């Protein structure tokens, strides 16, 4: 009686067939996939500042100052004081536009916090003031 010998090799032909079928499927399916697109808002520039506006200035050390429509400056002690002052100004009828001026050295986080607080108070016309060079 003849004994059977064990083969110690792997038949890879079926694996290659499966791999080629998957490759063809991916090659056909990839062009059909749609990529997500983000609609970025358009930013416009105002030809000039409004006649009357409020201005919030953010210094590089995070200090805040509020300028009323007459240009009178008030130093503020943080965001809570900003909420109080702007809330009092908001009660007087139609809200004025608000310009937020951030120092070049000011952390971006500080300017965004001020922007959020102004929007939460119900001011709809809010803009960032930039320097023209």
Image (cartoon, grey):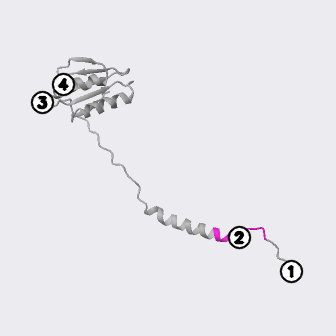
User: Can you tell which of label 2 and label 4 is closer to the viewer?
Assistant: 4
The part of the chain drawn in magenta is 7-15
Please say whether residue 13 is one of the residues in the magenta stretch: yes
Image spot of residue 56 (x, y percent)? 27, 25
Horizontally, is 19 left or right of 61 in the view? right
User: Can you tell which of label 1 and label 2 is closer to the viewer?
Assistant: 1
* Badge 4 or badge 1: first in the primary sequence: 1
* Badge 2 or badge 4: first in the primary sequence: 2
* Badge 1 or badge 3: first in the primary sequence: 1
The quadrant in which the N terminus is found is bottom right
Q: CA distance from mark 1 to mark 3?
A: 106 Å
Q: Give the residue displayed 68% in from the left and 68% down from the top.
A: 12
Q: CA distance from mark 4 to mark 1?
A: 104 Å
Neighbor class of circle 2 (other Cα within 10 Å; few <14, some 14-19, many 20+) is few
Q: CA distance from mark 3 to mark 2?
A: 84 Å
In the displayed orientation, state which residue is furthest to the front.
1
Considering the numbered disc 3 on the image, is that residue within a helix, a strand or a loop?
Answer: loop
Image spot of residue 77 (x, y percent)? 30, 19
* Badge 3 or badge 2: first in the primary sequence: 2
Residue pointed to by mark 2:
11
Circles 2 and 4: CB atoms closer than 8 Å = no
Secondary structure mainly formed by the magenta segment: loop
Residue pointed to by mark 3:
93
Horizontally, is 133 left or right of 29 in the view? left
Q: CA distance from mark 1 to mark 2?
A: 24 Å
Residue pointed to by mark 1:
2
Please say whether residue 71 is one of the residues in the magenta stretch: no
* Badge 3 or badge 4: first in the primary sequence: 4
Residue pointed to by mark 4:
88
Circles 3 and 4: CB atoms closer than 8 Å = no
Name which quarter of the figure residue 110 lies in: top left
């Amino acid at each position: 009686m003849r004994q059977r010998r064990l083969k110690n090799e792997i038949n890879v032909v079926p694996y290659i067939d499966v791999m080629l079928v998957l490759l063809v499927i991916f090659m056909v399916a990839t062009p059909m996939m749609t990529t997500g697109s983000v609609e970025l808002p358009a930013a416009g520039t105002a030809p000039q500042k409004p006649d009357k506006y409020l201005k919030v200035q953010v210094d590089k050390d995070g200090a805040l100052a509020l300028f009323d429509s007459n240009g009178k400056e008030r130093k503020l002690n943080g965001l809570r004081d900003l909420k109080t002052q702007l809330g009092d100004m908001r009660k007087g009828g139609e809200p004025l536009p608000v310009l937020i001026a951030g120092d070049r050295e000011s952390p971006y986080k500080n300017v965004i916090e001020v922007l959020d607080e102004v929007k939460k108070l119900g001011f709809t016309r809010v803009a960032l003031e930039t320097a023209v060079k």
